[in-house]
Each structure stands twice: as C-alpha cells, then as structure tokens.
Amino acid sequence: MSNDRDRHDGDGDHELRVSKIRDGTVIDHVRGGQALNVLAILGIDGSEGEELSIGVNVPSDRLARKDIVKVEDRELSQDEVDVLSLIAPDATINIVRDYDVVEKHRVERPDVVEGVLSCPNPGCITTGNEPVTSRFTVLEDGVRCSYCETIVRDEIASLIDT
Ligand SMILES: [Zn+2]
C-alpha cells in the first residue's frame, strides 16, 4: 500500500485499520454499539475458534461513532452481507487477502430474509414445533413476517435467531 493512496482517499486511518488482518473480512462503518449484533446475525460467537477483533464506538468521519468488526479467515457471502443491512445500513464490507483489500462492498437491503430472524408472535406458525423456516419481507422501516404479517420496526436485532 502506498502513502499516496492514503492521502488521496482521505481515509488513511481506515486503510491502516483494515490492513491489520491477513485474510478475512472487515466490516466497517457499523453504527455505534451494533458490533455484537452484527456478530449475532452472522452466527459468529468465537466458539469455533474464529479470530475476532471488535472496535466499539470508534470515532469516525462518516458516522459520529462507529463499530468495526474483523473476522479472520472468513469471507462473508452475499447473503450474509445483505442481512447485515438490516442493522448496519451504512456498513462497508472489506474482503482482505494477504493484507490487501481485494473487494469492497456496500450493503444492500434484501427484499426478504429467511431463517435469520425469529417472529415475535408466539402464535406464528414459524415459532411452533413445526419446522417452518422464518421469512420476513424487508420494508422501508422494518420487517414483516410473511406468515402472520407481524411488523417489527424497532429492535430488529432482538429477533436475531441465535
Ligand atoms: Zn410470524
């Protein structure tokens, strides 16, 4: 990496942080305080020996405070990236190989998310004993259960199926 590039993109600090892992994914510009929810939505808890680095409420140019999550030796799939948009709409996903950022993605809101969130309605077919995979339609300002039509606008992170 050249210093030249750092000067031009005006985000040299960001590049430095990203370059610290060898291979894996850096999820940057996560809204402050959401890092642990990001890990939960990805089903990452460290129990499989994943090497994680988490920065919480780090000063940021773009957001007042941001979180940053680094996962070594794992590249997020597009599905995982899409789901992240529900709780981290401003996130930037950096795929790192051999200390270089080889891909950079912004998250995009998916139309539906399946098998990620649990419906808060105890009478919903997806929360019973039948093996029905949860399915939510993503709205402008929340999500709607495709089975019982329950709409959740706040606390989406609390529905994450862990
Ligand atoms: Zn439901």
Image (cartoon, grey):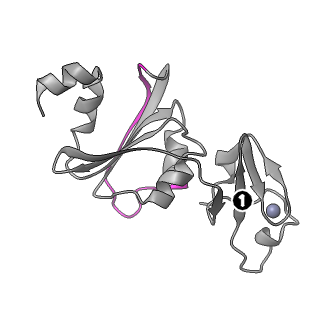
- Residue 60 part of the magenta-drawn span: yes
User: Residue most toward the right?
Assistant: 123
**Can the viewer see residue 1?**
yes
User: Residue most toward the bottom?
Assistant: 130
Relative to residue 137, is residue 74 drawn left or right? left
Provide residue 107's location: percent of width, then percent of height: 49, 45
Quarter of the image for the C terminus: give it.
bottom right
Q: Secondary structure at mark 1?
A: strand
Is residue 39 positioned above or below 20 on the image? below
Amino acid type of disc 1? Answer: Phe
Is residue 80 positioned above or below 21 on the image? below
Nearest to the observer: residue 31 or residue 3: 3
Quadrant of ligand 1: it is bottom right
- Residue 27 part of the magenta-drawn span: no
Relative to residue 21, is residue 86 drawn left or right? right
User: Residue most toward the left?
Assistant: 2
Q: Which residues are magenta?
A: 41-61
Would you name the residue on which mark 1 appears? 136
**Can the viewer see residue 43?**
no
Picture residue at 71% right of the left edge, 42% below the top = 140
Provide residue 91's location: percent of width, then percent of height: 47, 38
Relative to residue 19, is residue 39 drawn left or right? right
Provide residue 93's location: percent of width, then percent of height: 39, 44
